[in-house]
Image (cartoon, coloured by chain):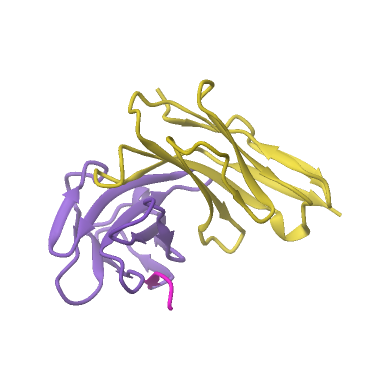
Amino acid sequence: NAGVMQNPRHLVRRRGQEARLRCSPMKGHSHVYWYRQLPEEGLKFMVYLQKENIIDESGMPKERFSAEFPKEGPSILRIQQVVRGDSAAYFCASSPPVGAGEQFFGPGTRLTVL
Amino acid sequence: AQKITQTQPGMFVQEKEAVTLDCTYDTSDPSYGLFWYKQPSSGEMIFLIYQGSYDQQNATEGRYSLNFQKARKSANLVISASQLGDSAMYFCAMREGDRTGANNLFFGTGTRLTVIP
């Protein structure tokens, strides 16, 4: 049973470009979460999605950031017009529909904005 | 107020000894879950152990145990018989509410554990 998949693992963008980060949850998991980790800090929640629905986006900046989890395909975190402050590790996690709510994390995407 | 507080930025432990990593939490919700994750230098987040607020017994998973003191709002991680491979960052996290509610996790700032041979 494959774990949570994220790609790319590393992404370099210049200021003003768009970044697209992909996440495929574990098989059977219907809940997807995105977190951001700045260097030497803990993870900060951004958005929680179920298939075709955004459940909670309270941690996501209102501008330039968007997320989706379509009926088919991976979840996408999109950052438009990236700035240097967007440089961070972005983690996706998934959890099953039942259970204690433990979240299983992907390996992360390290975004560097030049 | 911080929902999760980890007051130890760094800890050292001798190989084969036990070590306790501190975590305190703040919530007014009677239902919550507490988690510990390990983040080695390679960067991935590895789930270690879970404790529910209504669980009567402390959680254990192999060499990991969670010292849950509800009245003190603490959820310390105990690693027994430390191994060199335990060297990593350790994060405490909390989910507020029961499983059917919003399930985002609040993370602490982490503790960097170094195991000395």
> Which quarter of the rendering shows the N terminus of chain B?
top left
In front of the other: B47 or A37 = B47
Residue lying furthest front: B56
Can residue A13 be seen in the rendering of this structure?
Answer: yes
Instruction: Please provide percent x and percent y for residue B14.
Output: 84, 47
Asked if residue B78 lies in the magenta stretch, the reply is no
**Front residue (pair A22, B45):** B45
Chain identifier, yellow in the render:
B
Q: In the shown orientation, is residue B101 left or right of residue B81?
A: left
Q: Position of residue B4 (x, y in %)?
A: 47, 32
Given the current orientation, which residue lies at the most extreme right position? B117
**Chain shaded purple:** A
Span of residues in magenta: A1-7
Q: Residue B106 falls in which quadrant of the image? A: top left
Q: Nearer the viewer, residue A73 or A100?
A: A100
Q: Is residue B55 left or right of residue B80?
A: left
Percent coordinates x, y for residue A23 in the rendering: 32, 69
In the picture shown, does residue B72 fall above or below B87?
A: above
Please say whether residue A80 is visible from this viewpoint. no
Residue drawn at the location 84% of the way across and 52% of the way down? B16
The residue at 25%/52% (across/down) is A48
Q: Above or below — where is A78 with respect to B2?
A: below
